[in-house]
Structure formats: C-alpha cells, structure tokens
Amino acid sequence: MTFDPTTYQHIALERREAVLVVTLNRPAALNAIHFELHTELSRLFREIARDRSIRAVVLTGAGRAFCAGGDLKAFVNRSEDQLDDLFDEAKTLIGDILDMPQPLISAINGPAYGLGATLALFADVSYASEHAVIADTHVAAAVVAGDGGVMIWPWLVGAARAKEFLMTGDPIQAQEAHRMGLINHLVPAAELMDHAIAMARRLASGPSQAIQGSKLAVNALLRSSANLAFELSLALEKTCFRSDDHREALAAFAEKRQPNYR
C-alpha cells in the first residue's frame, strides 16, 4: 500500500526518498491538537506502517513549537460523542506508534507539552534544540496523563521522577531533559532537522529487517507496560474529563485566571 499524504489537512507530509518528514501543522495554535488533528494522528502511524517504501520517519512541528498538547479551546464545548471518539482514538494511537516498524525520529523544535510531549518521547530516537521545553501538562487541565505519559516517563527517567513531573506538570528545559535522559540528543536549533534527517537516512539505508526487528523487540517491553497501566490511565483520565476540577480548569484557562479547585 502506498501512503497518501493528500488525505491530511493538519499534518504536512514530505517524502525525502525513503524518509517521510511529518510536520504537525497548526503553527498559529502552537500545533495544539484539536479533534480533527487528533483523528488524523489516530490513523497516521498505521497508514505509514503499511507503506514499505517508507523506511524511516521524522516527526516535528511547524513554527516555533513542537506541539502544545491538547487544544483546550476546542475542548470547552465538546460533546459526549466527541469525548468518546477522542478516547477510542487514544487507545489506538500509542499502540500504532509502538507497532509501526519504521524507525521514528522526533525533532523537538520548541515546546512539547501534554500529548505533544508523549508523541516526542515515544520516538525511537529523539533530538531537541536548545529552545525545546518538555512538560506533561495534563494536570494543569485537571486530568490524568492517560494518553501515554504514564507509560513513557517512568521508562525514561524512573518512577520517582516521573511521578513528580506528572503530578506537577513542571516544564523541563532542553539541557536538563538531555541530562536526565529524557531525550537522546541536544543540538543547536539551526542544525536540528539536519541531525534528525541524517539519523533517519542512516536507519533507512541500513538492514531494515534487523533495525525494525530490534525496534519491535524493545517495544514489546513498552507494550507490557501498556498492558499494565495504559487502559487504567485512560479510564482515569476520561473520568477526570467529567469532573468539577476539569470544568474549573477550562473556565480558568478561558478567563485567564488561576483555577480555584474545591
């Protein structure tokens, strides 16, 4: 099957021989994920996996951000059907990233928050510019980090650090993220895409069966974490979406004030 980039409106896709560059493309909104972009992401990695002419993927964001996470403005007036669809899509999104055989390289060009941080950190190899900031900000919206953060943060930085950052939502500057092992490589902003694409091309030109098999075997360990925690974290997050605290968080965001949790 050949991957068709014309079916995406909020994701820019560029082929560079065997490498596919995927760019989250809502720069005016810091690439925040609204319902339409979430739906596109929920099928993106599955469709890439079916195109064997793509041998490596680079994921980045347009403009000055990688991804600001969920678009809270879009969530204010959501319907119950939209919420159900969102969580049905979330169940498949992370699994599709783990199951996609092609190596995934993230080029973190700026802030990566919430689900944006999850997408960046689930890459097989991550590069970040000095302008990158990483934070799982679900708690700022009074919801559990259920879309993958509960899985990937403990894997990268250990349970104690993961719980601290998931419970506080504190941002981590690129230098500190690199020091603690949250990202693989810290590079100058002007060289970010060059480094990410060079790695993608190296992997794309290598022995694909060995490279892809190595990725999938390691990801089986992450899959075991998913079996333990992912369904629970999603269920807890969905419960939070119906809570008074979440409604207060959205109201405070809209009114540009501090929330008052009761």
Image (spheres, rainbow, N blue to C red):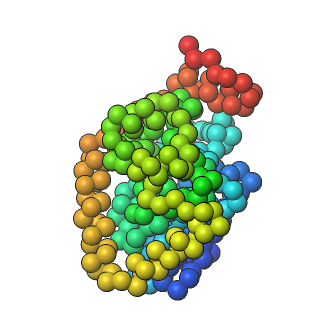
Query: Extreme top residue here?
Result: 262
Q: How many marks?
A: 0
- Asked whether residue 22 is in view, the answer is yes
**Drawn side of residue 197 relative to residue 179, left or right:** right
Residue at x-position 44% and y-position 84% = 53
The quarter holding residue 37 reads: bottom right
Residue at x-position 56% and y-position 82% = 16
The quadrant of the rendering that contains the C terminus is: top right
Q: Is residue 76 above or below residue 71?
A: above
- Asked whether residue 112 is in view, the answer is no
Of the pair 169 and 128, the residue shown nearer to us = 128
Residue 91 at x, y = what percent? Answer: 40, 50
Residue at x-position 35% and y-position 34% = 160
Of the pair 146 and 180, the residue shown nearer to us = 180
Residue 113 at x, y = what percent? Answer: 56, 45
Q: Is residue 172 above or below residue 103?
A: above
Residue 196 at x, y = what percent? Answer: 52, 70
Q: Is residue 44 above or below residue 173?
A: below
Of the pair 154 and 188, the residue shown nearer to us = 188
Residue 162 at x, y = what percent? Answer: 39, 38
Residue at x-position 66% and y-position 36% = 77
The quadrant of the rendering that contains the N terminus is: bottom left
**Drawn side of residue 242 relative to residue 104, left or right:** right
The quarter holding residue 103 reads: bottom left
